[in-house]
Amino acid sequence: MPYVVTRSCCADASCVLACPVNCIHPAPGEPGFGTTEMLYVDPRTCVDCGACTTACPVDALKPHTALGEAELPFLELNAAYYERNPHEDRAPMHVLPRPRALPAGELSVAVVGAGPAGLFAADELLRRPGVRVTVYDRLPTPYGLARAGVAPDHQDTRQVTRLFRTIESQPGFRYRLGVEIGTDVTHADLLRAHHAVVYAVGAATDKRLGIEGEELPGSVSATDFVAWYNGHPDRADDDHVLDTERAVVVGNGNVALDVARILTADPEALARTDISDRALAALRTSRIREVVLLGRRGPAQAAFTVPELLALSALQDVDVTVEGLPGDLSADSAGPTAAEAATHAAEKPRLLADLAARTPVEGRRRIVLRFLTSPTRIVGTDRVHALEVTATTLHTDDDGTVRARPTGATRTLDTGLVLRSIGYRARPVPGLPFDEDTATVPHEAGRVEPGVYVAGWIKRGPTGFIGTNKTCAHETVESLLEDFAAGRLTPPVSAADVAPDALGLEEWRAIDRAERAAGEAQGRPRVTLTDTASLFRAARAPLAPADRG
């Protein structure tokens, strides 16, 4: 009875190390670890011990007999990986830590950003004795996109926060939440109070389409839309008019698929999640019946992952259709990365061909994946009324890059809502250099200069998955520790707290308790507090006797 990985996972290697027969790959040190969409269990060598499920912090592994109907394709997906990647060496894996020798005395590090990249960096640092880490974040709550970016109908993905709760409970860990670096505290303040600063601030803005009409009401960033339905304090009070029968999402990554699912979901099902109450009220009165996702290139270049496509294809009450597939899907094979080519190059076309062959059911809402189509102009006067698009063809550059070229043939899609979902973009960090072309901070293995480091999207751009941040953080921390061991870091000149009024771990736990208690009363995982004032009130509310223990 083999175990099966059933979705994109955190890829933190806990299951790999727990497996007694080394049947979970790619493992640390192997090509693809930390960058592939998910890990895979070899059904031929799994011994059904269940050690992997005990170790997994996000419940991504299940015995094949416990798979639901929508999860059955993952059984084949796991097996298919080993047909292309045999991994003949079956020696049990034993990873012995080889800690770097550090000077005597404490090492104090500031981590700016409490999302996955920042918390993984804190975890890497706290594995060494004598290290203290203070994690700063602009918001009163941690976890970044794991809290405000994961779709509310993907509660299983949010279980990675269990891992984060373990990290923040370690001795030497401290939060300073509700603090904006550059406004409340400066870069110089952090350097005076700590040996080093790691910036893991992510990518908070989105890329632009650069077409006429993009500024019209009804033309919306998917980044802002996701933040709205997740109750992010920056966007919680936004209003989105959903009085159109068709919405168009430009882009076909996982975020685009999330947006399409939420716009076509049954509001009563969403009411059992932690979706923002304001967004839920808008979705209850929505007139949207169709969501079209536009991809400039073909299916092999689509940014969505196979697990997310499988989740989309398993929807019971929404039709998913495909348009614009090349006549020969096998010819459209130039994927974006080597890891993609090794694992899923054959899966996406096959799954999309199956979707294209489905017969729509009259009266259902539907999601349309349309390839080889590019937006050219948003049409409207006072607001969006339509989107003009053009067909494209694929051309391969000398360096192997596949590009879309417009054919000139245009058509118009009637719509009142256009959401751009073509990627995130980081903002400059005060006090640090910034590359405008890549929207990253220039670095070498995470080192900007001795004492200043970067991790996550501000370091490598908006690529990878949750587990990618772990590998990325490890590299950055190794650079930091190398500098500390070599005596290149300046000791703190002040032990004073640079943000004495900030929220700490206990205040965050008070917010968490308040949200969960409100959710329990409504049969929901939590009711998210969406404005800063409410979050600070919950943080500083006195404990009930039961909570005092």
Image (tube, helix red, strand yellow):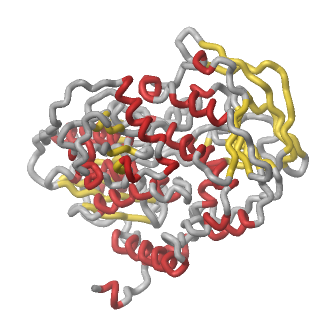
Residue sitting nearer the eye, 164 or 198? 164
Which residue lies at the image location 83% right of the left edge and 20% below the top edge?
A: 408
| Above or below for 394 versus 185 | above
Q: Given the current orientation, which residue lies at the most extreme bottom position?
A: 545
Which residue lies at the image location 68% right of the left edge and 33% below the top edge?
A: 357
Side of 509 relative to 297 (left or right): left
Q: Given the current orientation, which residue lies at the most extreme right position?
A: 381
Residue sitting nearer the eye, 346 or 34? 346
Horizontal and vertical percent position of residue 532: 54, 70
Which residue lies at the image location 52% right of the left edge and 58% below the top edge?
A: 148
Side of 95 relative to 419 (left or right): left
- Name the quarter where the N terminus is drawn: top left
Horizontal and vertical percent position of residue 32: 36, 30
Visible residue check, residue 313: yes
Visible residue check, residue 187: no
Horizontal and vertical percent position of residue 243: 82, 58
Instruction: Examine the image and state in which quarter residue 102 appears.
Output: top left
Residue sitting nearer the eye, 534 or 49? 49
- Name the quarter where the C terminus is drawn: bottom left
| Above or below for 60 versus 85 | below
Horizontal and vertical percent position of residue 94: 14, 39
Which residue lies at the image location 84% right of the left edge and 47% below the top edge?
A: 384
